[in-house]
Each structure stands twice: as C-alpha cells, then as structure tokens.
Image (cartoon, rainbow, N blue to C red):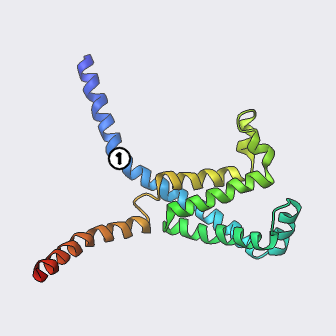
Amino acid sequence: MTSNAITRAFAKGHGLLNSLSPFAQSAFLLFVRLYWGWQFMQTGWGKLHSLDHVTQFFTSLGIPAPGPTALFVACTECFGGVLLILGLASRLTGLALAGDMFVAYLTADREALFSFFSNPGKFYAADPYTFLFAALLILIFGPGWIALDSWITHKFLEQAPAQDSSRRTQSDAAA
C-alpha cells in the first residue's frame, strides 16, 4: 500500500468519524443529563424529606442560615435534576448545580478541594466530584440536540423569519 493510499484511507476514516461526532456528542450529553439528572434529583429529594438532618449537618459545618440553606440546596438539586433530565434551561441549571457542588467542596470537603494539585486522587475521590464534573459538562457543552432546549430553539428560529416578514409587511402597509 502506498503512502498516498494510506493517507486517503486515513482521511476517509477521519471524515467518517467527524460525521458521526455530532450524533455521538448528543447521545453522550443525553446520557450525562439523564444519569446525573436522576442522581441530582434523588439526592435533592432525599434532602427534602430529611430537612432536619440536613439542617443539623449544615449547622455542624458552620453554614449561615442552615435551615433556609438546606431547603435551597435540596430544591436546587431536586428540581435542577428534573431540568437536566428534560434538557430545559440546561446551561443555567448546570451553572446552579456546579455552584452547589463547589460550595459542597468548600464546606464539607475543603481538604479535598485544596488538594487539587498536591493530591488529585483525594480531589477525585470526594463525593461532590462527579456531580460537579457532570454539571460542568452540561454548562460548557450544553444539553445536546436531544433536549427541550434544542427543540425550543429550533421552533423559535423556525418561526422568527415568518414573524420578521410579517413585521415588514405591516410596516410597509403603514408607510
């Protein structure tokens, strides 16, 4: 096989992988949203049903206003998880959940957070890590095509040119 044939075969394979990439990315983001959305929802639901214990835990961590904070965190996780599953307000939800997990690191796993460079294994082993990672994935990459956000955007963009042309027609008629 000549080097030119190898180069063409490589280019063809690379093109095939690139054409499959958007589908694979959306499928992966759907998996992340469904799995971690469910995990967030379950965690938040559990907190909502044991607010007294969560409030006591937050009190032991020295978190200000532990009762309202416990309710806020439980609602953020539970309803944020539902929004992730649906793919609705995904980036905003990802931001809220990433903030929630960063605060969890700061308050409950501070030593793991500050060992990010010196002992990364400790950072990765902490409970908030995978939740934070999933939230950051959705924040950075969005929900993918298989999401209500994408459907709403598609519908809005589909209707926008029709609305613009009707505005032009009305303004032309008024002139």
- Residue 11 left/right relative to 138: left
Q: Residue at x 54, y 51 (%)?
A: 137
Place of residue 83 in the rendered image (x, y in percent of width and height, measured from the top left) = 54, 69
Q: Residue at x 61, y 72 (%)?
A: 79
Place of residue 141 in the rendered image (x, y in percent of width and height, measured from the top left) = 47, 52
Task: For label 1, count other residues whose C-alpha is less than 10 Å away and answer few (under 14), some (14-19) or many (20+).
Answer: few
Q: Is residue 170 above or below residue 66?
A: below
- Residue 78 left/right relative to 68: left
Q: Residue at x 58, y 56 (%)?
A: 135
Name the foreground residue: 76 vs 40: 76
Q: Residue furthest bottom?
A: 174
Name the foreground residue: 160 vs 125: 160
Q: Residue at x 76, y 73 (%)?
A: 68
Numbered disc 1: secondary structure: helix
Name the foreground residue: 112 vs 22: 112
Please say whether residue 165 is visible from this viewpoint: yes
Q: Is residue 68 above or below residue 9?
A: below
Give the position of the C terminus as an image quadrant: bottom left
Place of residue 16 in the rendered image (x, y in percent of width and height, measured from the top left) = 31, 40
Task: Tell me the amino acid under the disc marked 1.
Answer: Leu
Quadrant of the rendered image containing residue 131: bottom right
- Residue 25 left/right relative to 116: left
Please say whether residue 34 is visible from this viewpoint: no
Task: Please give the residue where the numbered disc 1 appears in the rendered image.
Answer: 20
